[in-house]
Amino acid sequence: MAGLRRLVLDVLKPLKDPSIVDVALELSKVKGVEAVNITVNEVDVETLSLTVVVEGDNIDFERVRAVLEEVGAAIHSIDQVVAGERLVEIPRRPRE
């Protein structure tokens, strides 16, 4: 069954625990998740701004959202969604 293959999320997480390592490990336990990549974009006095990339086969988005909420994080925006039988890569334009 085709489902969600990739999610790219803009996430805000409190600076305090858990660490992004712990968040990645918890997300990797979600049904359908095969890989998690978390990048810190900004550090504020109280929050981290993160890009969270989740890839897999038939990812359970509601469970991903729940795990993030359980660790005190919030999805600020959904920046990319890929669904279907395969991943679709956007070709990069050559620089002039």
Image (cartoon, rainbow, N blue to C red):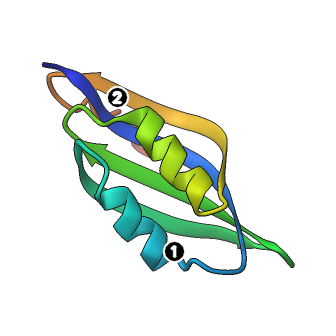
Is disc 1 surrounded by few (<14), some (14 to 19) or many (20+) residues within 10 Å? some
Amino acid carrying label 2: it is: Val
Q: How far apart are marks 1 and 2 (CA)?
A: 23 Å
Residue under numbered circle 1: 20
Which circle, 1 or 2, is nearer the viewer?
1
- Residue 68: percent from the left, percent from the top? 55, 54
Left or right: residue 27 compared with residue 8: left
Q: In the drawing, does residue 93 fall left or right of residue 18?
A: left
Circle 1/circle 2 CB separation < 8 Å: no
Q: In this view, does 64 lie above or below 27?
A: above
Residue at point 57%, 77% (across, down): 18
Percent from the top left, x then y, of residue 49? 69, 63
Residue closest to the eye, 11 or 23: 23
**Which residue lies at the image location 47% right of the left edge and 68% below the top edge?**
23
- Residue 66 position, x and y percent, is 52, 45
Q: Mark 1 or mark 2: which comes first in sequence?
A: 1
Q: Residue 82 carries which label?
A: 2
Nearest the eye: 71 or 43: 71
Above or below: residue 6 compared with residue 38: above
The residue that appears at 36% across and 49% down in the rendered structure is: 54
Query: Does the rendering let one see residue 92?
Result: no
Q: Where is residue 72 in the image (x, y as percent from the top left)?
A: 66, 61
Residue 31: quadrant of the picture:
top left
Helix, strand, or loop for circle 1? helix
The image quadrant that residue 40 belongs to is bottom right
Q: In which quarter of the image is residue 14?
A: bottom right
In the drawing, what numbered circle is on residue 65? none
Quarter in which the N terminus is drawn:
top left
**Amino acid type, label 1:** Ile
Furthest residue to the front?
70
| Neighbour tally class for label 2: few under 14, some 14-19, many 20 plus, Cα within 10 Å | some
In the figure, 70 relative to 41: above or below? above
